[in-house]
Amino acid sequence: MHIFLRKLSLLVFLGHSAMVIHSEQSSNLSAGQQSSSLSRGGHTSAAVVLGFILVLGVLGNFLLLLVFSRFPGLRTPANLLLINISVSDMLVCLFGTPLSLAASVRGRWLTGTYGCRWYGFCNALFGIVSLVSLSLLSFERYTALLGGSQLNSVQDRRARLAVAVSWFYSLVWTLPPLLGWSSYGPEGPGTICSVQWQQRSLAARSYVACLFVFCLLLPLLLMVFCYGKILYDGKMFSLTVIMKRRLTPLIIVLFTITGYLLCWIPYGVVAMLASFEEPGVVPPAATLVPSLLAKTSTVLNPVICGLLNNQTFCSLESAFSPFAIVKLYLHFFFTPFCAFLSQFSRCFLHMISCSAEDSTSSDGVWSSRGIWPQNMQIKEQNTEPATLPSRDHHGRQWEQVQMDDNET
């Protein structure tokens, strides 16, 4: 009997201690929420933006996954990475965005400490998977340019390995906050949870620095290197090539890098400032805008990487041929949007070529490979440019063909 009473008192003590710890964590979370000085209008604006991100992100990634499921011919080894990106973005929209949307509507976090940790872990995991997959996609295109034709079985194994590497790499960098290296908690105005950037300990700062270098900067450098080699080795900045080649692969390259910079670099810079600068340099409410920009990647990725491709877009139209509303949306909204991107890219590259021609010397003409003699440049302009032996993300070669007169 005495032993039983001792065990019972021990259980009561442990239960009371757990309740105290949970109460302290909840009070700290509430204090973090109350410390944010975001107005009611600010919370409402954030809720509206998150609502658009949720709807457009789910719709875009669902359409892209539907196309890949309806048309087996599109499920090439290279497109496995695109499917992986869409899956990770869809998971962000389903498991992360609704929680932050509900918190912004109410003006405070609603699911407690453990819900905050779950939200931070899921968003970090799926976001890093998307970033790593984008960089591996650029590397796959670059290796396809170097390696030429390979067996489909080899390409398939390499693509599946890349998908597995993206998830394993992301787990390596998102599990440590759950194990004691930094932590997940409320961010900014208290309606979003992420890594605790404001912690001043050496362990927390080292984790933030490693996350910035290995999960943000390193994928960006890999993308810039691979796409830069593809563009410059193929002489795609030549004015003759610009006027005669279909620009869809080039548009995808430019907007992939631009979208990456726009969505993720502001978030990484703000996180580094909040971690390494003096307290108060980054107000809590100021971290909300970079966080929302990072979430817009779930909307941009399916448009840039998938739907800008002509084959994928035509497959999408045929998949929704019985639905007049969807066809009207595709023809009157998405097609003009793609035409605008094409014209903008053509004008941008034309300005680059003109500025390069103005800076040439009298002894030679600038090209992507250096200064060429003028007689060689004239000979190059009078001949058809060579076909670029690279591939798009459907495994097809980027052929150099004459633009149609009626093509926008």
Image: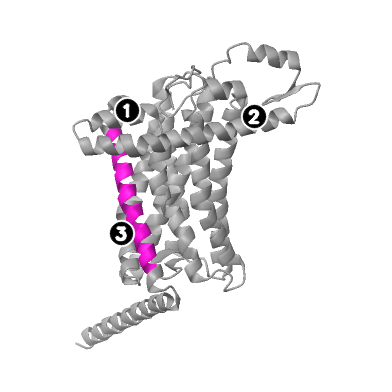
Which residue corresponds to the image point at 31% horizontal and 34% vertical from the top-left? 331
Q: Position of residue 315 (x, y in %)?
A: 30, 28
Q: Residue, x 47% and y 46% (percent of image)?
A: 131
Q: Which residue is found at the position 49% from the left and 17% from the top?
A: 402
Q: Position of residue 362 (x, y in %)?
A: 81, 23
Image point (38%, 68%), residue name: 43
- Residue range of the region highlighted in magenta in the rendering: 43-67
Task: Please tell me in which quadrant of the rendered image residue 229 appears.
Answer: top right
Residue count near mark 1 (Cα–Cα under 10 Å), binned few <14, some 14–19, many ≥20:
few
Provide the residue designation for mark 3: 98
Q: Which mark is residue 353?
A: 2
Quarter-wise, where is residue 358 in the image?
top right
Q: Which of marks 3 and 1 precedes in the sequence?
A: 3
Horizontal side of residue 96 vs 234, given as left or right: left
Circle 1 sits on which residue? 314
The percent position of residue 257, horizontal first and vertical second, equals 52, 41
Q: CA distance from mark 2 to mark 3?
A: 46 Å
Give whichever of 289, 144 is nearer the camera.
289
Q: Is residue 107 above or below residue 295?
A: below
254 w.r.t. 212: above or below: above
Q: Specify which label sits upstream in the sequence, 2 or 3.
A: 3
* Quadrant for the C terminus in the image: top left
CB atoms of marks 2 and 1 within 8 Å: no
Task: Give the mark toward the camera: 2 or 3.
Answer: 2
Disc 1 secondary structure class: helix
Q: Are there few (<14), some (14-19), or many (20+) residues within 10 Å of tag 2?
A: some
